[in-house]
Image: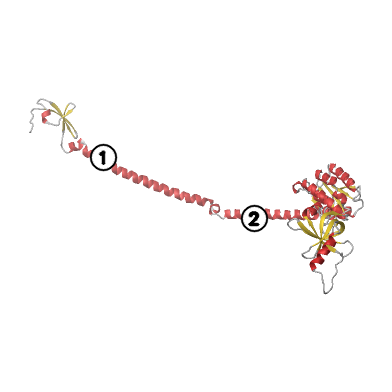
Amino acid sequence: MALTSSPDNPQPLRTIVQATKSWVERLGAVWVEGQIIEIKRRAGQVQFLTLRDSVADISVSVTTTASVLDAAGPLPEGTVVAAWLKPQVWLASGRLSFDCHELRPLGLGRLLAAIEQRKRMLQAEGLFAVELKRRLPFLPRRVGLITGAGSAAERDVVENARRRWPATVFEIRHVLVQGPQASEQVLAALLDLDAAEDVDVIVIARGGGSVEDLLPFNDEALARAVHKARTPVVSAIGHESDTPILDLVADVRASTPTDAAKRVVPDAAAEAELIRNARQRAQRAVLSRIAAHEQALAQLRERPVLRDPAAAVSVHREQVADLRQRARRSVLDARDREAERVAALVARARALSPKATLARGYAILARGEETLTSAAQAAAGDKLLGYLHDGRLTMDVESIEVKE
């Protein structure tokens, strides 16, 4: 029903917004093709994005949920999608918006979503783990190269590698690098080179291209073969901005084929310079060590003991002579002291000896073995011996007088 209005009888704003809401929402949900030009992810369930028409300069705001975005896979800005939208008008603001219930990438977006899903699966299995990456040999005996026949990538790898190390030997396998059969041929060449005993590193190279052109290097079977290979693999696919699955599973990712050549062989000139520098450092170290030892020897020669080796002996000889003299004096002094002490002891002994008493005119009387100390011990007629200091006398006792 059409609404009537005039300057004198205008319709309330709420009525117009409500009518607009009713008219818009009659459309119901509809599939719409558009290009995502902005995604605003926020905490919570409700998310916001902006869709633009692929041809006309028309864009709309879209609300959706985190689960819808996650189910659609990776959706970088610029992805063309089919969106199931339901238009709605907000009464409070009169703003027109679209509620998205499902998103499906179209064309390239669908392809990118499939590749991203494959990446997530292989990553979850651990094929991209850093700890599984193998180190490249310093100087490979033979470099395996998988590339397109007569391609710029082949020239870049070979010429740059031989410019760095002229003796580099290549084992080249020419394969298709785009198209339906490319991944099978690259896989077969990889298995062939990996089985060769003298191939120490394998380079897979091709120039840049579109996502469709690089599709063979996102192949799951090829990724698993690289993961299982015993030989280290270098991925040199496309430009720096290109990151196929092969780059992630390879042991080394080279930004370009030229970069791959720099990684697989050393630079002969740089290595020669390193050797020259090392020899110079070693020579300086040896000369420095010799100079240090010469200086130490000179300092040793300047020491008094080495300038005059007999000086130390002379000093000790003088010390020994002095010690001998001191010892002699000590012994003589000790002897003299002991002699004086002995003489004093002898004098004391002599002073206590009966002979000293006899020398003063006294005598000792004895009868046999008995020494007489009292007159009462003798009797008249006894024969006594009288001991003097210079002899003895034999005496007969005629009488005895004992004093009281």
Q: How far across and down, in percent of the image, does residue 285 sit?
A: 68, 54
* Residue lying at 47% horizontally and 49% vertically, measured from the top left: 316
Residue 346, disc: 1
How far separated are the C-alphas under marks 2 and 1? Answer: 78 Å
Residue placed most toward the observer, 142 or 226: 226
Residue 305, disc: none
Q: Residues within 10 Å of mark 2 (few under 14, many from 20)?
A: few
* Residue picked out by circle 2: 291
Q: Residues within 10 Å of mark 1 (few under 14, many from 20)?
A: few
Residue extending furthest toward the top: 381
- Element type at marker 2? helix
Q: Quadrant of residue 21?
A: bottom right
Q: Is residue 35 above or below residue 230?
A: below
Q: Earlier in the sequence, mark 2 or mark 1?
A: 2
Q: Is residue 379 above or below residue 340?
A: above
Residue placed most toward the observer, 118 or 362: 118
